[in-house]
Image (cartoon, rainbow, N blue to C red):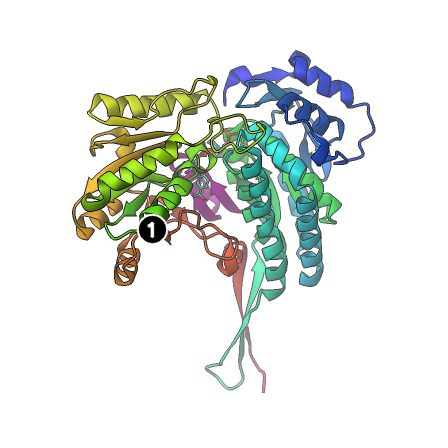
Amino acid sequence: MASARIATAFTRRSLTHRFAATRTQPRSLFCCQAHQMSTDASSVAARLSSSGFIRSQGFIGGKWTDAYDGKTIEVINPATGEVITNVSCMGARETNDAIASAQEAFVSWSKVTAAERSKCLRKWYDLLMSHKEELGQLMTLEQGKPLKEAIGEVGYGASFVEFFAEEAKRVYGDIIPATLPDRRLFVVKQPVGVVGAITPWNFPLAMITRKVAPALACGCTVVVKPSEFTPLTALAAAELSVQAGIPRGAVNVVMGNASEIGDALLASPQVRKITFTGSTAVGKKLMAGAAATVKKVSLELGGNAPCIIFDDADLDVAVKGALASKFRNSGQTCVCANRVLVQEGIYEKFADAFSKAVKNMKVGHGFTEGAVDVGPLINDAAMHKVESFVQDAISKGAKVLVGGKKHSLGMRFYEPTVLTDIKNEMILAREEIFGPVAPLQKFKTEEEAIRRANDTNAGLAAYIFTTNMQRSWRVSEALEYGLVGVNEGLISTEVAPFGGVKQSGLGREGSKYGIDEYLEMKYICMGNMN
Ligand code: NAP
């Protein structure tokens, strides 16, 4: 955590003062007229704040709570560098109280009927969707993604709540044929208990609902730790969960000192499950830390997605798919194409068409009128990483077809970039770029493409573009990845299992499989039944 961003409540900057002043106004929550909103970031921020949509405290046991030592941390608009607000900077003590609240709420929530839990989740879904404009604006403010994309994420995030509202009613057990005549054998499924959910900044809503919705659906309660960069969407979603009738204490949100909060969640024997989305390095630490109390663990970690374009691909489909998978969220998704492998017969044509399409992408502030395709990177460290990866590649012989430098908008805007002549020794051929940079690599045969695609410790998403049916099956089966898109660059949906193999993670989120991560199986043997 950047210590410079930690401030006491008395050192808030001017924009925050404006928000603080609005606190005396009545909090008729979420009453702003989204369609009348100005597209200017600071006026959007002021309106969201005055309507009570921007929360700055943590949420513990259903109460909005300051950090116990009064510390706050700035939330910054990555497009402008302005401070949106200061939020509580919490640590171990607040986390332990949130765990205790979640434990208390678990006792009653786990006994509520599945039908009732389902109704609450459905109501939460309805509230998220009816506030999708405001939630989208909040997300654009704190995360930077273009407003249309942000509103799209609200729909995507809410879809998990809708889906698991339905799944809540389908947590079935089993009856097993007995091995002795006087016995009856049953399997029942029960909620694991209190869940600690740690989420990243790149999908400020969807990464939370993908965990919290299945957890609540089967009777668990949660302590959520959103990223320090994007806590506001999480806090607004928590407020809506209470309005939906989900009992206070069932959803808690603490943010601030990541390692202190993480350590408190890991140390607590009451927390029975850790679910994490984020970098592989932090995921490994959490997995090791969970061993001390033998918690269930789900990990959604980093990727290094290959996007393979075969000679027989439909060029338009391949360009559209590669663009979508590479540049969504400014290249800051775990499933973004990280390496574009192009077969030699189509290489020149693809490089040309792809470069033209990339050149036409519009970079801008998320609130800009008209279509913006690429927003800012999340912070200076991300900008530095992308710049250094591109410089490293250029110094080792890569050629720039498009972009290759910071955008003229300045701040954290980077030009959508296409590089060619990529070699394996370049950092961006091996590590997650997490920025709008597409490195093109040439290959000769299908076997070579599969070998190079699998030559990584990551195994989250892969994409292939081909019109050959047999090849699409053959290559899909050979790729060591949890998700494969064939002739499609956007493949995530609430109804399909999302998750990686190798060092990209453990477990699956979404779909009918995702709820199992929050359930324990209990075998009950009844004797003397004759
Ligand atoms: P990150 O640095 O690992 O952070 C993720 C979360 O972990 C944040 O809430 C962060 O808190 C917290 N954290 C950091 N250090 C911690 C610690 N020692 N103990 C407990 N929590 C800790 O990852 P990120 O930069 O936010 O996200 C980008 C990464 O996420 C990429 O690698 C991407 O591929 C991956 N990702 C994976 C998926 C997937 O489904 N597989 C989806 C999205 C993103 P603070 O932010 O407050 O420091």
Q: Residue at x 59, y 31 (%)?
A: 231
**Residue 283 on the magenta segment:** yes
Quarter of the image where one finds residue 24? top right
Residue 529 versus residue 191: which sits nearer the camera?
191
Q: Residue furthest left?
A: 444
Spot occupied by residue 416 in the image (x, y as percentages of width and height) = 39, 29
Q: Is residue 356 left or right of residue 490?
A: left
Q: Answer above or below: position of 82 versus 31.
A: above
Q: Magenta segment range?
A: 273-301
Q: Is residue 524 left or right of residue 427?
A: right
Towards the viewer: 457 or 189 = 457
What's the amino acid at mark 1? Tyr
Question: Would you identify the image quadrant in which residue 335 lies?
Answer: top left
Residue ID for mark 1: 481
Is residue 255 visible to the viewer in this orientation of the structure? no
Q: Quadrant of residue 428?
A: top left
Q: State the quadrant of the C terminus.
A: bottom right
Query: Which residue is at 74% across, 35% downward?
Result: 33
Q: Is residue 207 visible?
A: yes
Which residue is painted at 36% across and 25% down in the image? 386
Q: Residue 518: x and y, percent?
A: 54, 54
